[in-house]
Image: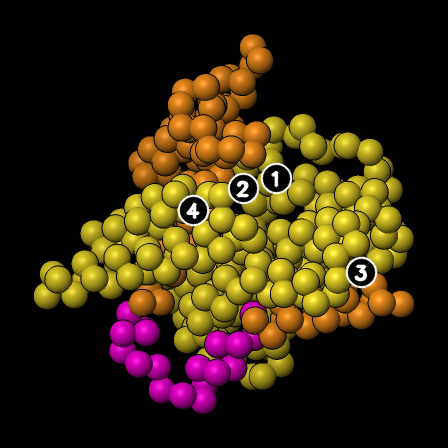
Chain colours: A orange, B yellow
Amino acid sequence: MKLWWIILAAGMITYAIRLSFILALERMKIPDWFARGLRYVPPAVLSAIIVPELANWNGAVLLSWQNPQILAGIVAIVVAWRTRSVVLTLAAGLACFLLLSWPA
Amino acid sequence: MSDSRWREFLSGVRDEAPILLGVVPFGMIFGALAVHQGLSPFAAQTTSSIIFAGSAQFIAVQLLGAGASAVVILMVVFVVNIRHALYSASVAPHIAHLKPIWKYVLAYLLTDEAYVVAITNYDKHGVSPTRHWYFLGAGITLWSSWQVSTLIGILAGGSMGENWPVGFALPLTFIALVIPGLKDRPSVAAAITAGVIGLLTFHFPYKTGLLLAAFCGIAAGLWLEKRKK
């Protein structure tokens, strides 16, 4: 029984967070610096997710060629920059990753 | 349904699709882990539909299995998911004109993966009278795959999915989405700063490093923007 309350409360907390600014910002005027700051949310959050994820090798930071995700990530960045294609970026990154981790 | 709504919806579905390569294995691992930690199949599935937040679900289920108290679990869920407040603020101006029901539905669908796809589309194409259908298409695609992959994990149990190399697809897709948006120096500075701080705070618990890194990145972008003027 207690389990169900925990799941429900966790769901409500998560939902309240996701709803927070969507509802709050319709009631107040957005300060200028806040609006400008929002422009940097996607690059900042995504990079904060991507970089540690690429560096993460078996649960620890490994910044070396031993970690195939580093080179595969760099290849993906170059392909994304040149082609702007999600499919090509994914294909190049995965191919590079699989090739590098093949012998292991 | 008018054509343009349907077209928007389908573009959202299509653009969300590549991310699923990375999401599905995680959903499967979650389903298997939840059952392994003693949740009933129904409770495991409900977790995915009620909480609907990958990392928070993993941590919550592990804490449940370890016998943590309800207060601890809920506090951890709050801390792990607080980054969604940033997404909420980020999409708010784009959906401010919509009816309340849309806001309540889109907020429920506001995961990392749906946010990324939707905000990239808003940045690229701006707001239109039917653009929110794109967001809905991306969100529902992610939601359905999360539910189905959880179910597969529950049924299959064991360790399937754990060695699936395409789990790496998630950061790769994020790379494909973030790079074209780096159009000026403040954006590049925001990304680099957030990446470096993210590395330095790698060991911080419960994604607090991610939040700190994101704030530093945003501050760096604002600072450079101000200095240029």
What's the residue at 76%, 69% (across, down)?
A: A8
In the image, what residue type sits under mark 3?
A: Thr
Secondary structure under tag 3 reads: helix
Q: What residue did someone put label 2 on?
A: B170
Kindly indicate whether the residues beneath marks 3 and 2 are on one polypeptide chain. yes
Q: Nearer the viewer, residue A5 or A49?
A: A5
Mark 2 and mark 1 in contact? Answer it, CB < 8 Å: yes
Q: Can residue B207 be seen from the camera position used here?
A: yes
Q: Chain of mark 4?
A: B
- Looking at the rendering, the stretch of residues picked out in magenta corresponds to A18-36
Residue B221 part of the magenta-drawn span: no
Q: Which mark is residue B201?
A: 4
Q: What residue did someone put label 1 on?
A: B21
Q: Chain of mark 3?
A: B
Instruction: From the viewer's perspective, tell me whether residue A64 is left or right of residue B14.
Output: left
Query: Which image quadrant for residue B47?
Result: bottom right
